[in-house]
Amino acid sequence: GFGAEISRLYGAEGAKVVIADLRDDEGAALAAQLGSNARYRRCDISQREQFQALVDFAVSEFGGLHALVNNAGLSDNLFGSLMDADFSMFADVMAVNVLGTMQGTQIAARHMAKHGGGSVINISSISGIQPGFGFFTYRASKAAVVNFTKSAAGLTLDVSKQRIDSGALKALSDLAQAMDPTAMKLAVAQAAAKGGKALDERAVAEAADASIRAMMLVR
């Protein structure tokens, strides 16, 4: 999936990577594949204490935290019309997609602001910026991620120390919509090079990598 490809790309670039998931076997196998610069940590991101423990683990293992990608997400899988929706997964989807992203951003930003800055990339979706049929809870959650990320980056944090990149992904053009103009240009260039093909896991990883590179220029 997206998270695995992001981890592989960052590992290939020389980053030290902590993989967080609830799929222990797959997460541990990926960490083993990436080698000594990768670790796996079980984490339910909807639980604040687990997210804090994740950040503490990364700092303990590798001496710091310079980038966080909030990629974990759930979908409601509601293919039908609004009249048929039962919203039975509303609480779970919002807990992971929205609360997890919000508190993870806060926890990471607090550490980064005290240790020279860093990058937070919140993965959204075209569903969060464009209306469509079905998936009402998922769409609402991703719209919330976009608004939260832009609000946090523009109104809350000292951008001289901390930048948050809104990875609102547009499937038709492989465009990563970024808060930072440099990151936007890098993402657009990658999209053009791909000829406008539908977004895949590698494209998401490369867009996130481009954003990280741009954000690292900000002190």
Image: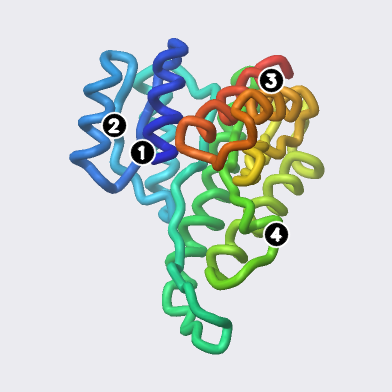
- In space, the residues marked 4 and 2 are separated at their CA atoms by 34 Å
Q: Amino acid at mark 3?
A: Ala
Specify which label sits upstream in the sequence, 4 or 2: 2
- In space, the residues marked 3 and 1 are separated at their CA atoms by 24 Å
Q: Amino acid at mark 4?
A: Gln
Q: Amino acid at mark 1?
A: Ala
- In space, the residues marked 4 and 1 are separated at their CA atoms by 29 Å
Give the farthest residue toward the top.
14
Mark 3, Cα crowd under 10 Å, few <14 / some 14-19 / many 20+, is many
- In space, the residues marked 1 and 2 are separated at their CA atoms by 6 Å
Mark 2, Cα crowd under 10 Å, few <14 / some 14-19 / many 20+, is many
Looking at the image, residue 94 sits to the left or right of residue 165; the answer is: left
Residue marked by disc 2? 40
Q: Are marks 4 and 3 in contact (CB under 8 Å)?
A: no
Residue 138, given in percent of the width and then of the height, sits at 54, 64
Please tell me whether mark 1 sits on a helix, a strand or a loop: strand
Residue marked by disc 4? 130
Which residue is pictured at 29% across the width and 42% down the height?
Answer: 42
Residue marked by disc 1? 20
Q: Are marks 1 and 2 in contact (CB under 8 Å)?
A: yes
Q: Nearer the viewer, mark 3 or mark 1?
A: 3
Q: Nearer the viewer, mark 4 or mark 2?
A: 4
Specify which label sits upstream in the sequence, 3 or 2: 2
Label at residue 214: 3
Please tell me whether mark 2 sits on a helix, a strand or a loop: strand
Residue 212, given in percent of the width and then of the height, sits at 61, 23
Q: Nearer the viewer, mark 4 or mark 3?
A: 4
Q: Nearer the viewer, mark 3 or mark 2?
A: 3
- In space, the residues marked 4 and 3 are separated at their CA atoms by 26 Å
Residue 209, given in percent of the width and then of the height, sits at 56, 24
